[in-house]
Image: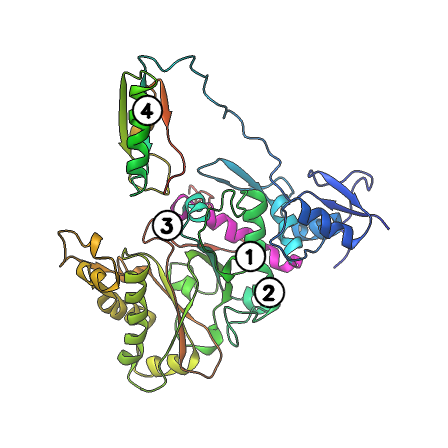
Amino acid sequence: MSDVVHADPAKPVLNSKVYDVADFAAAQELFHSNGWTDGLPVVPPTEKAVAECLDWALMPPDQLIGIEPVRAQPITAEKLAINAVMAGCLPMHFPVVATAWQAMLKDEFLLHGISSSTGGCAVLVIINGPIRLEIGASGTFNALGNSDRATSVIGRAIRLGLINLMDVRPGGIDRSTFGHPGKFSYCVAEDEEGTNWLPLAATRGMPDGVSAVTVMAALSPRQIMNEWTTDPKEILETFAAEMRANQLHYSIYGGNYAILIPKQLRDIIEAVGWSKRDVAEFLYERARVKRKDWANVGKAAIVRDRPEKVHTALESPDHLLVVAAGGPAGGFGAVIPPWMGSKTKAVTAAIGACVDCEPPKD
Amino acid sequence: MTLRVFDPTNEMKLAGIRPAPRLASLEGKTVGIITNGKEGTKPYFTLVDRMLREDLGVADVVWRQKKNYSAPAEAAIIDEAREWHAAVTGVGD
């Protein structure tokens, strides 16, 4: 990419405070000593690198990405770009980061609540659409782990932004009793080429072919395994059992769950003609517990006078995020529970589109 | 070679948010308690209530509970709080 041209090279186009450090190592110490990192080294956010991110996304430095609703914190493109560079993002990754933040700043996501809770969750970012291929985001081998550069650095950019722009530092705004590894980076791209199912974003109202991100306040992934059946219902029963376990062990209340189904299990489910909607409706029916079940896991004290009350893991089938992802072999799957029931809602936003723009008047 | 790097933190100052004027005394005043409703807050705020009344001479203590313990208090509670002389709220578990 060519250098960004400034009208006056002596005058930075960026507005943030600058620090002159001796070298790369000194930059690391500056950022660590100020609590500006996640504990890992960062890429020094130089003017050139930050400006290139903004240039790629066609965003001026002072473009307002959004305002955090509770603490009224304004989030600008410049500050997001600085944190994205620190996380290791290339310019082509930045539009995904900026869109994820636009989604996170929606009221229904409850960003302050999810990032300050003792309940310890992370922001899961799910990428759909052609941009996955353009940036090399993989949804196959080692999904949810260190599968590829793009998802690793995009997920990390979300966390560094939370730390630096929202003061979400452990013991500060972040009051988590336990975190989980997704609080370093939590991003996955859907394996759209490996499935006949609609992409997640399309099931959530995005036009086909549009690149989009979905953000969800998410606990750590829980792996399941069922390699001993070719019955789709039996496979999904294993997912349902994990969801019920989370209801009893963590929170009984319904919310957005995400499930990741890899190709080996997907092929079985798709072969009988089941869509993502069919999967969601099956799990809506099967992932539910009675309040009295709490007594079996040491929570008898809160069964109270409603032992027969039924709690569904999903408030409706619409609340399940079904994602085609995972390596091509292996009868595994992942259940990703929500932070706290429906207090937060997953949000999907199109990349490269203004999510707050008013429709044309004509 | 010197490396020039940028501050990654939010440098924009919030406008219009400042602490309320401090009261010289709580004697005879009305104090609101806005609780998030979590189990552990009950004994805590019960003690605060007693201290406010018995030790500091507060005339009335009004309890209100948020519907969502992770979200700000509802507008109705905030509106009502305008009638109080002081309010006690914050992180609780």
Q: Chain of mark 1?
A: A
Marks 1 and 3, how far apart in space? Answer: 21 Å
Image marks 3 and 4: residues in contact by CB distance under 8 Å: no
Q: What label does residue A162 carry, if any?
A: none
Marks 4 and 2, how far apart in space? Answer: 55 Å
Marks 2 and 3, how far apart in space? Answer: 26 Å
Expressed as whole percent of the image width and height from the top left, the position of residue A267 reads 38, 82
Give the residue number, with chain letter if any, for mark 2: A150
Range of magenta residues: A88-109
Q: Nearer the viewer, mark 1 or mark 4?
A: 4
Question: Which sits earlier in the primary sequence, circle 1 or circle 2?
Answer: 1
Find the residue positioned furthest to the right: B1
Question: Which sits earlier in the primary sequence, circle 1 or circle 3?
Answer: 1
Q: Nearer the viewer, mark 1 or mark 3?
A: 3
The kind of residue tagged 4 is Met
Q: Are marks 2 and 3 on the same chain?
A: yes
Give the residue number, with chain letter if any, for mark 4: B51
Expressed as whole percent of the image width and height from the top left, the position of residue B4 reads 78, 46
